[in-house]
Amino acid sequence: MEKIEQVLDPKTIQEVKSQLELQKKKILDDLSNISGHDNHESDDRGAIFPEYGDKPDENAQEISDYTTNFATEKVLEKSLKDVENALERIEKGSYGTCKYCGNPIDGRRLLARPTAGACIKCKTELQENA
């Protein structure tokens, strides 16, 4: 049976928390650069549609940039949710525990991917069954 490195020590968890808070701020800054107020979105935010002009090539560029911004916004929103969930687990004292099996998540995994909420075994099983 493979030995699992136990959950990180409190000092390291505080360092991870600081990194996650910085990452959250960066994501929010990035989101503010590509999205604006949108009453049609559940989170009141949506990708900004650029306005370059009325010529066909300008319209094509607007659509291309909007499509890129929309996709980027979705990736950033998922990243933000992952970071917020990790910060919540730190606050609740459950950081480093797999949300599926309840076993400790290897500390090396947490250092490599601080937002991880599942151990390698459970994550692998989820991906294989997807």
Image (cartoon, rainbow, N blue to C red):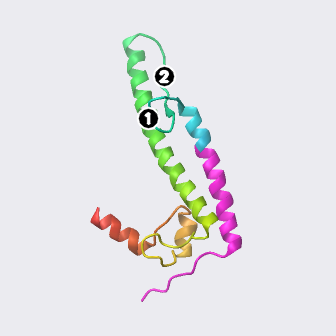
Q: Is residue 82 above or below residue 62?
A: below
Q: Residue 50: which disc?
A: 2
**Quadrant showing the N terminus:** bottom left
Query: Residue 35 in the image: x percent, y percent?
Result: 53, 32
**Is 41 placed left or right of 6 in the picture?**
left
- Per the rendered image, the range of residues in magenta is 1-27
In this view, the residue farthest toward the bottom is 1
**Residue 44 sits above or below residue 9 on the image:** above
Q: Left of 38 or right of it: where is 127?
A: left
Horizontal and vertical percent position of residue 84: 57, 54
- Kind of element beneath mark 2: loop
What amino acid type is highlighted by mark number 1?
Phe
Element carrying mark 1: helix
Q: Position of residue 89 (x, y in %)?
A: 57, 64
Tell which residue pokes out farthest to the left in this image.
129
Residue at x 53% of width, y 61% of height = 115
Name the residue at 45% across, 42% down.
Answer: 74
